[in-house]
Image: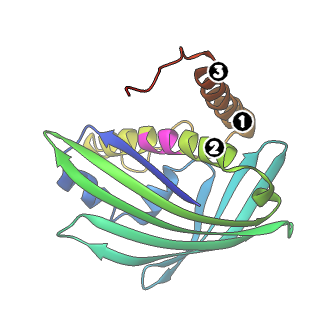
Amino acid sequence: MLIKSDFDVAQPVETVWAFFDDIPGVAACLPGAELTDDLGDDKYLGKVAVRMGPVKLAFSGTATITERDDAAKRIVIDAAGADEKGRGQASMLVTATLASVGRQTKVDVVQDVQLSGAAAQYGRGMIADVTAVLMRDFATNLQNRIAAAERGEAGVALPGAAAASGFTIGLRALRMALARVFRRFFMPYQPSPN
């Protein structure tokens, strides 16, 4: 399943791109993610924990940077892992492209997600909603971590960066799903212009 998202960071593109060289720092911005070992050659061991409805999934696996294009400000990460309780597997190819927009940076993210087992039973909408919540939190944490580094506070723990609260993420994803349903059923009828 292909999931596309984007967000803005109130920093120049060169600053954000330089931050993307700090893979442990970037991983710390994603709620529920943790790098556990640097294997060298842009390959890392790590864990990701997230709650999908009533099921909490904890994946352990590897993440490899397969492409880093300084001129295009593009990075591609191939990640794969298995649930620690044997309830499924996940793989994801993530492509992030940075572009300068005035004094800010726009980050476009494309995630090609493949799931099997317990996580695969949830529909595309639920997975997309949870991903959207995680990306919003990631963007906020990224912005805060870059600002902290500029103030000389590198390595400062940020609220929400360490763990993905299943209850909070679930509620936010449910709110997004309900908003979609209400828009679909309660939007005034718009006849086609024929």
- Residues marked 3 and 2 touching at CB (< 8 Å): no
Q: Please, is residue 26 above or below residue 75 in the view? A: above
Category of crowding for the residue at label 1, using alpha-carbon neighbours closer than 10 angstroms: few (below 14), some (14–19), many (at least 20):
many
The structure residue drawn at horizontal position 36% and vertical position 49%, both measured from the top left corner, is: 154
Mark 3 or mark 2, which has the lower sequence index?
A: 2
The residue carrying pointer 3 sits among few (fewer than 14), some (14 to 19) or many (20 or more) residues within 10 Å by Cα, namely few
Look at the numbered disc 3 and give the secondary structure of its residue: helix
Query: Along the horizontal axis of the image, is 111 left or right of 145?
Result: right
- Label ID, residue 147: none
Q: Is residue 138 magenta?
A: yes
Q: Which residue is mark 3?
A: 185
Quadrant location of the N terminus? bottom right
Between residues 128 and 25, which one lies in front from this camera angle?
A: 128
Q: Which residue is mark 2?
A: 130
- Disc 2/disc 1 C-alpha distance (Å): 7 Å
To which residue does mark 1 refer? 170
**N-term-proximal mark, 3 vs 1:** 1
Side of 106 relative to 46 (left or right) = left
Mark 3–mark 1 distance (CA, rounded to whole Å): 23 Å
Disc 1 residue type (three-letter): Gly
- Give the total of numbered labels: 3
